[in-house]
């Protein structure tokens, strides 16, 4: 390592605390349909500043819940979530969240949607204008500025959602299945723009995904979760993220195979486990 | 565009022809022919009818504005604040089905025989319709939308302004269209009592004199008032909800 005072080449204001630290986190929804639902149980992991992380696991295993908790929108039932050494707060200014269905407001034009975060923060008009123009330009959306979300394709909408998050210059970017509803090519194209954006701004990035390929392409750390209640099964390191042509490397393919095997193996385990305890479930 | 105009014109023409034919067949004072009626309308609107039209129009517009100003904020807050929703729910849904028109005598006893009791009665009825619509719409807003705007740093007021209000706006216009019809009907009944102004009074008065052509002039005035208000609503809606355009 060099003589630089900060570790891992992070920026000089680095405090030594990880960007995200989750300790023994449990989340219980007390008002589930059939009584309380234990969505997360004893989840622990941490992320370095500027690191990317992919969360993958079966449907209902608590990925969205975990993301909301990182955003401070859901309170932990027990355990701790620290962002840069501080307990998570709902209105932490430098966190941006992009939801499964984009979370764009149908009644606002592209421009207004993208400037919303700045407007809410009472940023002066001129500054808003400059920032929004810059971000829309960088994502190739300037021509769409006066359209409503209903007049855009899925890929364009996704880009708008990303643009809205980027205007806030977040140091923690949380994304819930951002590209799941797109066709394969658009999807890869947006994944690549995301990596490029990340390489420029270096936010800490957490992406929830159902796609093994996406997890391997985007996550320097890949967290595999299992459901009922949601917990962390495995953490894999994936240092190749962001290198040129990563999708075509042997390492990329090896990792996708590993993850596929882990997920399948875990599914077999959990279904046979369930069948032992509730044999009627598989009949009904 | 031109298709639509053509459609309208054809509809009007058919209506007039049917009316004319019926008037000729019945050959009764109670159904004058279109030319007689339009002539009477022309004469009447230059005279007393316009005063009555203005009185009714003012009452309808004032009651609707009052109702909207009270119902929309209340509905938004009830739809957003869980415990208020829980408290107010039974209250509203028990009183909602009661036909408010039965309170006309009570209103006249309390608020006097003048404009106030009529405006309040019509306003109350429209208020209920608007309240229930706004409330339901506010409750139905997806939590994801609220989450995503909250994560941008929104405070409670920002949520009302950027999410709740625009989300219910199209529903408010739909409710206004329905409410407008009810309002005019209720006003007609209310104006049959203790007033000498308004289309309700005018219709009753001309009818009691057997002046059917003038009565029909009043009906036309009422129809025009409704039509005009619908046009205004349509225009406001297009201005206020541009994202709904197809
Ligand atoms: N508000 C809530 N109230 C009660 N239960 C909830 C609530 N939100 C989520 N759950 C439950 O918590 C569990 C985890 O849900 P979550 O949405 O986090 O899963 P997920 O991993 O994101 O699933 P998917 O991949 O399908 O999006 C599920 O069993 C779900 O039914
Ligand atoms: Mg989810």
Image: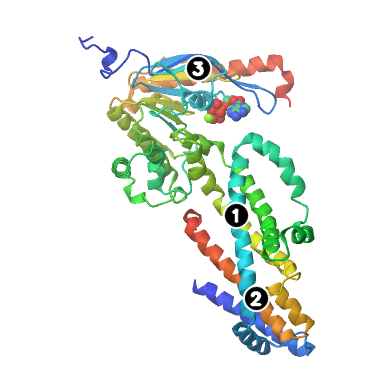
| Up/down of A42 relative to B8, above or below | above
Residues B131 and B239: in front is B131
To which residue does mark 1 refer?
B68
Residues A142 and B124: in front is B124
Give the number of callouts: 3
Q: CA distance from mark 2 to mark 3?
A: 81 Å
Residue B11 position by quadrant:
bottom right
To which residue does mark 3 refer?
A262
Residue A214 position by quadrant:
top left
Q: Are marks 2 and 3 on the same chain?
A: no
**Subunit bearing disc 3:** A
- Which of label 1 and label 2 is nearer to you? 2
Residue A185 visible, this orientation: no
**Subunit bearing disc 1:** B
Rendered residue at 60%/54% (across/down): B68
Residue A131, position as x, y percentages in the image? 30, 40
Quadrant (top left, top right, bottom left, bottom right) of the C terminus of chain A: top right
Rendered residue at 50%/74% (across/down): B2
To which residue does mark 2 refer?
B52
**Mark 3 packing: few (<14 Cα in 10 Å), some, or many (20+)?**
some
Residue B38, position as x, y percentages in the image? 64, 86
């Amino acid at each position: 390592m060099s003589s630089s005072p900060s570790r891992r080449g992070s920026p000089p204001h680095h405090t030594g605390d990880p960007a995200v630290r989750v300790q023994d986190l449990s989340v219980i929804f007390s008002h589930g349909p059939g009584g309380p639902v234990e969505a997360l149980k004893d989840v622990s992991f941490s992320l370095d500043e500027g690191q990317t992380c992919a969360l993958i696991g079966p449907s209902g295993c608590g990925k969205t819940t975990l993301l909301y908790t990182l955003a401070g929108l859901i309170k932990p039932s027990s355990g701790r979530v620290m962002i840069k050494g501080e307990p998570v707060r709902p209105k932490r200014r430098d966190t941006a969240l992009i939801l499964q269905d984009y979370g764009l407001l149908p009644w606002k034009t592209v421009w207004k949607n993208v400037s919303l975060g700045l407007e809410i923060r009472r940023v002066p008009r001129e500054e808003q204008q400059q920032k929004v123009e810059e971000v829309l330009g960088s994502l190739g959306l300037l021509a769409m500025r006066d359209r409503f979300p209903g007049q855009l394709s899925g890929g364009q909408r996704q880009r708008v959602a990303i643009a809205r998050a980027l205007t806030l210059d977040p140091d923690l970017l949380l994304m819930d299945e951002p590209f799941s509803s797109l066709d394969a090519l658009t999807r890869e194209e947006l994944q690549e723009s995301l990596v490029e954006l990340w390489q420029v701004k270096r936010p800490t990035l957490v992406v929830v995904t159902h796609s093994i390929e996406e997890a391997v392409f985007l996550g320097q750390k890949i967290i595999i979760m299992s459901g009922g209640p949601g917990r962390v099964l495995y953490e894999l390191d994936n240092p190749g993220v962001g290198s040129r042509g990563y999708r075509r490397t042997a390492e990329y393919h090896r990792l996708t195979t590993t993850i596929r095997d882990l997920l399948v193996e875990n599914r077999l385990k959990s279904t046979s486990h369930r069948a032992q305890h509730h044999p009627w479930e598989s009949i009904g | 565009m031109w298709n639509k105009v053509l459609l309208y014109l054809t509809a009007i023409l058919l209506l007039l022809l049917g009316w004319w034919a019926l008037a000729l067949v019945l050959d009764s004072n109670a159904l004058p022919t279109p030319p007689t009626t339009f002539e009477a309308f022309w004469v009447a609107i230059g005279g007393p009818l316009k005063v009555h039209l203005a009185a009714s129009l003012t009452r309808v517009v004032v009651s609707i504005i009052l109702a909207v100003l009270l119902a929309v904020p209340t509905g938004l807050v009830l739809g957003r604040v869980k415990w208020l929703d829980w408290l107010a729910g039974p209250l509203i849904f028990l009183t909602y089905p009661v036909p408010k028109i039965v309170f006309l005598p009570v209103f006249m006893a309390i608020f006097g025989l003048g404009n106030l009791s009529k405006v309040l009665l019509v306003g109350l009825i429209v208020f209920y319709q608007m309240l229930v619509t706004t409330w339901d719409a506010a409750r139905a807003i997806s939590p994801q939308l609220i989450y995503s705007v909250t994560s941008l740093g929104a405070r409670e007021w920002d949520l009302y302004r950027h999410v709740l209000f625009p989300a219910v706006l199209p529903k408010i216009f739909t409710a206004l269209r329905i409410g407008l019809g009810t309002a005019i009907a209720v006003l007609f009944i209310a104006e049959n009592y203790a007033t000498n102004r308004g289309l309700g009074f005018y219709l009753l008065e001309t009818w009691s004199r057997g002046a059917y052509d003038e009565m029909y002039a009043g009906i036309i005035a009422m129809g025009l008032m409704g039509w005009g208000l619908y046009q205004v609503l349509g225009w406001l809606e297009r201005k206020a909800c541009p994202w709904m355009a197809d």
